[in-house]
Amino acid sequence: MAFGYPSSIFNASNAWWIWGGWGATITGALLGVAVYDLCIFKHGESPINYSRQKWHEEGRKAEVGWLNMIGDRGGARDVADKLELGQA
C-alpha cells in the first residue's frame, strides 16, 4: 500500500504474493537441501541418508543415556555391551 498498490491485491482470493514470494522460495530451499543430502552429503549427521540400522543404533545410545540418568546402571551397561558387540 505504501507503493500505491490497492489493498485488494493482498486479500486471500488474490494471494499471488504468498505463493511466489514465500511458497516457492521455501519449497525450493527444502527441495535443494533434500537433493544435496541425497546425492552429495554422505556423513553420519544426515537425517535423510540415515540407514535403518543407524537409526536403531542411535536410539539404543539414547536409551543408554536415559537409563544412566534414571540410575539403572546395570541396564545401561547391558545395552552398551550389546552395542559394542553389534547386537543393537
Image (cartoon, rainbow, N blue to C red):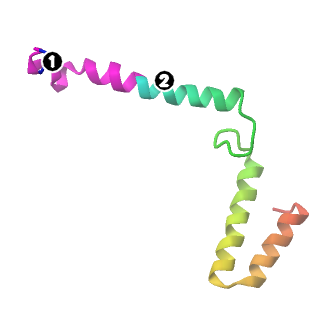
| Residue sitting at the far right | 85
> Which sits earlier in the primary sequence, circle 2 or circle 1?
1
Q: Amino acid at mark 2?
A: Gly
What residue is shown with label 1? 9
Q: Amino acid at mark 1?
A: Ile
**Looking at the rendered structure, which numbered label has been put on residue 28?**
2
Name the dominant secondary structure of the magenta segment. Answer: helix
| Residue sitting at the far front | 2
Which residues are the magenta region? 4-24
Residue drawn where x is 27% and y is 20% of the image: 17
Looking at the picture, how far across and down is residue 79, in whole percent?
79, 72
At numbered mark 1, what does the secondary structure look like: helix, strand or loop?
helix
| Residue sitting at the far top | 4
Looking at the picture, how far across and down is residue 37, in whole percent?
66, 32
Total count of labels: 2
Could you say which is closer to the camera, residue 78 or residue 6? 6
Q: Quadrant of residue 18?
A: top left
Q: Quadrant of the N terminus?
A: top left
Label 1: how many residues lie within 10 Å, few (<14), some (14-19) or many (20+)? few
The question of residue 19 being in magenta is answered with yes
Left or right placement of residue 56 versus residue 87 in this view: left
Label 2 – label 1 distance at C-alpha: 24 Å
Left or right placement of residue 81 versus residue 57 in this view: right
Left or right placement of residue 31 versus residue 77 in this view: left
Label 2: how many residues lie within 10 Å, few (<14), some (14-19) or many (20+)? few
